[in-house]
Image (spheres, rainbow, N blue to C red):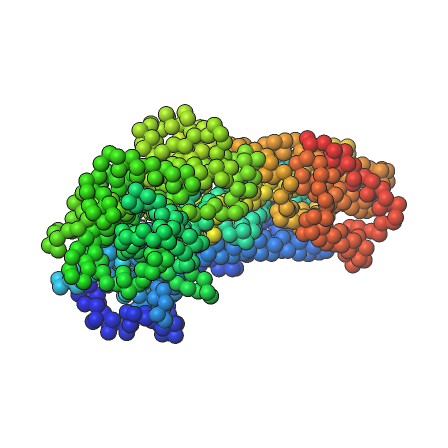
Amino acid sequence: MKWYKLDTDELKQQLGVDDNKGLSSNDAASRLKKFGANVLDDGKKTSLLLIFLKQFQDFMVLVLLAATLISGLLGEYVDAVAIMVIVLINGLIGFFQEQKAEKSLAKLKELSAPMANTLRDGKWIKIPSSDLVIGDIIKLTSGDRASADVRITKSKSLEMEESALTGESLPIAKHDYPIKQDNLEPADQKNMAFMGTLATRGSGVGIVVGTGMKTAMGQIADLLVKTEQVVTPLERKLAELGKILILVALVLTAFVVFVGVYQGQPMYDMFLAGVSLAVAAIPEGLPAIVTVALSLGVQRMIKKKAIVRKLSAVETLGSASVICSDKTGTMTENQMTVKEIYLNQETVYVSGEGYDTKGSFSKKDSGTEDSSLDSLLLYGALCNHAILNKKKGKWLIDGDPTEGALLVAARKANITLEDTEKFRIVHEIPFDSDRKRMTVVVEDEDNNRFVITKGAPDVLLPRANYISDHGNRRPLRAKDQNQINHAIENMAEKALRTIAICVKAISPNQKLDDLSLEKDLTFIGLSGMIDPPRREVKDAIKECHSAGIKTVMITGDHAKTAHAIAKQLDLIPTHGKVLEGYQVSHMTEEQLSDIIEDVYVFARVTPEHKLKIVKAFQNRGHVVAMTGDGVNDAPAIKASDIGISMGHSGTDVAKEASALVLLDDNFATIKSAIKEGRNIYENIRKFIRYLLASNVGEILVMLFAMLLGLPLPLVPVQILWVNLVTDGLPAMALGLDQAEDDVMKRNPRNPKEGVFARGLGFKIISRGIMIGIVTLIAFITTYQGNPEHLRYAQTVAFTTLVMTQLIHVFDCRSERSVFARNPFQNLYLVAAVISSLLLLLVVLYFEPLQDIFHTMDLGLRDWIFVLALSSIPTVLFGFTKK
Ligand code: ATP
């Protein structure tokens, strides 16, 4: 269908949609059912069976299975079946872990899925892009990615960057009238916006004409490179470490077997014991547990309103040493209220709170009213896209809060929608953070045209040659300039954001050329609006400070406004510097790096400065978190170590570039995410410590016994049972541990540090040796060189090994001392330990299992002995930090 050839009426008729109301939700639902979801099919599906089988592909597990098979054939049925069952359960656990990891990753993807601004049942709502259907009316604003093929019906300077589809990186201006030519390529269909392309400027409205695989993008979807499996740096490091550990475990196991055979142990027994030991000692489950710990942490972050888009960010968060944060909306409420207006060389004070339209003007009350205040307010309301709505008795703004504030101020002077609707907007140059201004050309009922420009005063004043003085235009003199600058500073010192308003009359036939429109303007006045800091931000900044993290404010606002707010938030110390965008421009990256440690506020910056700021901090060795919301913020977000975007106000482009999305746009959420990131990393360290120390203990007890010419202290099923029960459950529970109290009092983790840094290696080895020694003591003292005691000694050794680990697991919760934390705080861990204990009692006392696990009943004296021995490693090391 050649949608670009139709005019709007034909389009609406063919697609069965009313452009005032959009589709009804019922109609949309039935279309969705009929035509399917608006998604590109990536054809990737892994079957559950395959994931299950994958659990057994590990080489040592295969050897174990083969060995069990052989022992089964040799008549050792009980052992064979027991080992098979254990391996199967192990596989099942691995399978469920992987499933869980997959599911939570898929859920994450869903949460960060793009939304589309759609007209349904007469209301503009945001729906997941996948729910879009043909006939839906959608709005595209600068920064949005088109989520379907759309025929544009209204374009306000809309420009689309179509490189994803056509390879052309220069944006294309889009219009809204039909094109009569035939056989146009997508690149030439200038009234269409295609799925996957990006609105870089202006805004537009259009009707969806193609969804899912039936879009231009869908036709080439097969050619698109699909997202590769992402592995986080930690997962990669652990995978590498895993390889080394496998080697070490294999060598040691081979050594155990060799010594055992040399000492006269039966070859076959030693072989099976060796293979079981290898399976137990090789931490094959480690990467899976890491992924689960990461994704569970990510779930916790979602509850705190932070969505992690890249799993690697979780680790990096713990190393963040600088947060560069936008001011407006992130540190402040983004609820603007005009408090002061400067015009005719005097200041008018405006009363009223928030977006409530009740309020008055000090000057009007004084009775010296003239029409210039009304004119300024009307201009502010005309150069404006915000819409005021009343919901549940409260006035709310739909649109830009800065514009909302101007609209509310106009309402306070009884300037209504009818007043503004008398004017027609014939042209618009949209606002963006680079230009810091917005212009409209309006036409009144008598066809008189004039330009209204509003924006940052320091940007507008150089474009103004005239000033309006009580309604009379006269040249703008140096004295006026000084007075205006003084007024700006006054407002800024009170933390008010300043917006200047300028106008110019033009003739109806003047060409609407962007360059000449914003010249020779007449300055009307200034609006100063307050945007209060968010309540929780001050404490969050303080907490970051004690965590060794510097907070830096980055804003497009005036330096003094920014400084005033930074002071209210205790963000800037007395010696702290405020740097302005133009100063950043004049410096090289190196010069900026030299002074950047003293800078706490960057004011009047444009998005391009952000990139330089990120690099300058990185040059100083910092790990930088950078927030952003606009299209032009994407490069800085990408270049930072942790790119952060805003869930509410962020554009699709910023979100796509970011690793973390703040659902509530709130600075305090960054702090919570960092805290969680630190905790997740610490938890991963905790279970690595636990698992490896346990494995070291298991290998050593076998090795020592062989060296001393003793029989096997543990039989293969016991070793595998320990691997399954004691190593598995408590390790998982450690992954869910709460943060230590001082987690935000330590300095950020050095991103270069290895997994075993900060004494972890020593802890693993020392505890491992102790676990091995006490188990061996348990064995030797009960065995007493008497082969008749063997089963009894093995039972005591097995119980001691399990109990030592179950006590030691509490030591792993803290980097300081086992007594530093309340053991009942982590109820998962308590539950895991109790269930391991119950399972131990079952294999010890349940008769049918005793033969399988080579165990026997233990008496009270045995237990006292076992418990005394098992506590030794934790008591011995529990007091030390080392
Ligand atoms: P940040 O979110 O990074 O703190 P900001 O919101 O403070 O940035 P911008 O939105 O880039 O910064 O605004 C910069 C300046 O542009 C403001 O100080 C104001 O003077 C002007 N400005 C802001 N919004 C508008 C608008 N809608 N129309 C015209 N001018 C605007």
Q: Quadrant of ligand 1?
A: top left
Q: Is residue 131 above or below residue 876?
A: below
Does the rendering let one see residue 176?
Answer: yes
Question: In the visual, does 430 lie left or right of 89?
Answer: left
Snapshot quadrant of residue 149: bottom left
Q: Quadrant of residue 36?
A: bottom left
In the current view of this chain or complex, which residue is farthest to the front? 367
Tell me residue 650's x, y (percent). Answer: 39, 50
Q: Position of residue 746 (x, y in %)?
A: 59, 34
Q: Residue 830: x percent and y percent?
A: 71, 50
Find residue 652 and report its horizontal and vertical position in percent: 37, 52
The residue that appears at 22% across and 58% down in the rendered structure is 425
Give residue 787's quadrant in the image. top right
Question: Can residue 379 be spotted in the picture?
Answer: no
The residue lying at 49 percent from left, 40 percent from top is: 568
Foreground pick, 547 / 188? 547
Q: Quadrant of the C terminus?
A: top right
> Relative to residue 10, is residue 656 drawn left or right?
right
Residue that sits furthest to the left in the current view: 509
Residue sitting nearer the eye, 412 or 387: 412
Q: Residue at x 52, y 59 (%)?
A: 49
Above or below residue 153? Residue 640 is above
User: In terms of depth relative to the viewer, which is nearer, 773 or 14?
Assistant: 14
Q: Residue at x 30, y 45 (%)?
A: 343
Q: Quadrant of the N terminus?
A: bottom left
